[in-house]
Image (cartoon, rainbow, N blue to C red):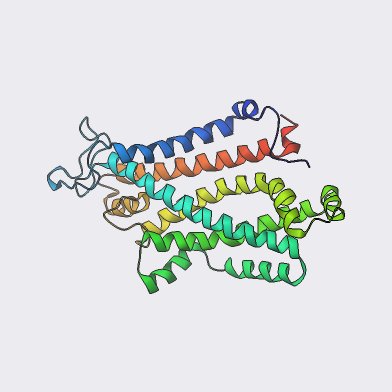
Amino acid sequence: MPLTPAAPGLPRRALRHPGTVLGGLLVALLVAAALLSYVWTPWPPYEMDLAAKLQSPSAAHWLGTDAFGRDVASQLLVGARASILVGVIAVGIGLVAGAALGLLAAARRGWVEEAVMRLADFSLAFPAILSAIMLTAVFGPGIVNAIVAIGLYNIPTFARITRASANAVWSRDYVAAARACGKGSWAITWQHVLPNIAAALTVQVTIRFAIAILAEAALSYLGLGTQPPQPSWGRMLAEAQTLMFQTPLLAVYPGLAIALAVLGLNLLGDGLRDLLDPRLARQR
């Protein structure tokens, strides 16, 4: 059974792919910042010192301080935690639930496939921000509701991609041979279909992770995501908007952090697509 993710010399080809290398470095930097914040930050991230508010970058405060006297560098390091937490859990919800629905639709076909796809189409009418607003109206704002909203928004995307990729595998000769040997639909799904669509799902995970970071920042900016005193890049942008002409760097730092994180994940996703697609791999 041919498995598309496997390719000889994959690490070597990855190092020759500039986008993959740059994306991997940016993602590694994001993860390192979040991990570092658990053991060290330049200043306590929740400590306020109104006497030191709105200071310019200095040896004491590398990126300056905000309107409450909090160290901006420490806030950025801790803010990376929220982005990764939301991304991992929300994308995990979408991947598990969406892939299961997509595999079910491809295996059963008929009215089951039609029902799953129409449900996915209906779910796409409720973007993450709108879902978060509805959840907030019922349960109140918070990072949990933001994760649930983003996770629910990811489910139909993964379901559609999984179903399309699985349908292509179901038409292959080796699947027909497995059926002729008496294997059932679920055995074929686990042994043949899922391993051969893993590459497509891996690429989609990186792309949806980037979208989840953007969605978390947008929800926190609107006051629907991470709540004080927990630092968040989106809320740092919201707090800086009234000081744009006084201290514009307060908006530049979190905006740059969001941009680099999203850029890194998108570059990594594009690179993985090029490396894991056998047709593109043969061209390199």
Q: Position of residue 173 (x, y in %)?
A: 86, 49
As displayed, is residue 185 above or below residue 59?
below
Q: Residue at x 29, y 39 (%)?
A: 73
Is the C terminus in the top left, top right, bottom left or bottom right quadrant?
top right
**In the image, is 145 to the left or to the right of 99?**
left
Q: Residue furthest front?
A: 182
Residue at 28% in and 56% down: 228
Depth check: 242 or 45 in front?
A: 45
Residue, far bottom: 138
Residue at the (34%, 36%) spot, across then down: 36
Give percent across and percent down for residue 140. 35, 69
Q: Quadrant of residue 70?
A: top left
* Foreground of the two, 57 or 156: 156
Q: Identify which residue, 261 or 145, lies in the foreground.
A: 145
Position of residue 268 in the picture relative to residue 1 (left or right): left
Q: Is residue 271 above or below residue 141?
A: above
